[in-house]
Amino acid sequence: MRLAASEMPPLSATTIDGTVHSVFRRVVNVRLGDGALLTLYASDDDRDPPGAITFAAPADFDFSKHTTHGAVVACRAGVLRIDGSDVSIDLRRARQRTPNSVEPSQGVTEAGFNASWRTAWRALITADGTAGLVVALYGRRPAGSLNAALAGRARQTIPRLLAGARTNDIETASAAAARLVGAGPGLTPSGDDFLAGFLIGARHIAGSRPQIAFLDAFGRELSMQYGNSGDIACAYLAHAAAGRAARPLAKLAEFITTGASERDTETATDAAMQMGHSSGSDATFGLLCGLAAWHKDFAVMIEAELAEPGQ
């Protein structure tokens, strides 16, 4: 079965050689020779992970029926093949892009930004999810000891992270982030999802040299967390540190920083929160905190919500 890639990151054929790291129904992660993870994403929707090769596949396509962990992956003559599998992916007509890269926004009015941020924040805190760090924002006791522990850690740690960012204090921010890395269950724990979102949000609004220098240093710290969390989560943190985001998250950040309409911002917030079980909500929470990093009024609002959720 040969499938045609629609989009791919700017990689040469020689850099794609590696082995299958993990297999899911619509996703395969490939461990490349340099240690990085490359995602093969069997869908043309807008939820592709950062840095993925995307391609359309039949509705019943299931990677787990075609390959296993450890299989050799190689690209020759523009076609990616997996050893022992009948699936190959033709990369020759794929559009190469730098996936959803983030640059500081310019030209937006403060009033437009403020209104869009408040719209997204309102959508987040009224969503009333049941898992992840974001449960710290809801005015009820979290279900289960794990979610209660995550909520407690969020209430203790996120204000410290915001305080460190506001003063470009890398030591304070890194110490706070260290308590979030690997916090939570799953392939991308809640703490990692939050931090990836935070990096993307802050990158969108960093304007001064001290702010950019802080983010560069903070990103380097979070890019070196292998051993403190899972491989996939660490790969996503490395993407976020480089300014690359999943498309729904990048779109929401763009809408907020360009002062999009209330309806568009609400729709984009909902789409971002729909990624994964709790990953989308936690990443959206992090994104809004990152966008508030150097906006004291919003940081105070976040801290107040964490201190007295649901009020």
Image: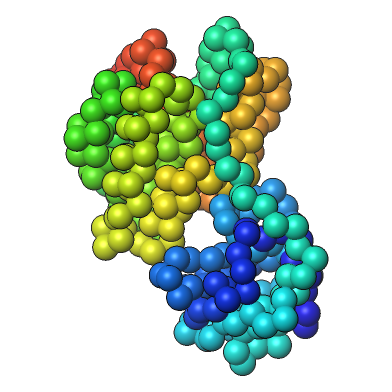
Q: Is residue 38 left or right of residue 296?
A: right
In the image, 77 versus 236, the foreground residue is 77
Please report the residue visible at 23 percent of the width from the left and 28 percent of the height from the top: 169
Could you tell me which quadrant the C terminus lies in? top left
Q: How many marks?
A: 0
Please report the residue visible at 41 percent of the width from the left and 70 percent of the height from the top: 35
Q: Is residue 62 visible?
A: yes
In the image, 268 versus 151, the foreground residue is 268
Q: Is residue 23 visible?
A: no
Please report the residue visible at 72 percent of the width from the left and 76 percent of the height from the top: 78
In the image, 148 versus 221, the foreground residue is 221
Could you tell me which quadrant the N terminus lies in? bottom right
Residue most toward the top?
A: 111
Q: Is residue 282 above or below residue 227?
A: above
Q: Is residue 207 left or right of residue 92?
A: left
Give the quarter of the image for residue 248: top right
Q: Is residue 30 above or below residue 171?
A: below
The x and y percentages for residue 221 are: 29, 46
The x and y percentages for residue 176 are: 23, 37
Give the quarter of the image for residue 83: bottom right
Q: Is residue 194 above or below residue 263?
A: below
In the image, 12 versus 251, the foreground residue is 12
Give the quarter of the image for residue 260: top right
Please report the residue visible at 29 percent of the width from the left and 35 percent of the height from the top: 154
Residue most toward the bottom?
A: 84
The x and y percentages for residue 219 are: 36, 43
In this picture the colour scheme is rainbow
The x and y percentages for residue 158 are: 29, 30
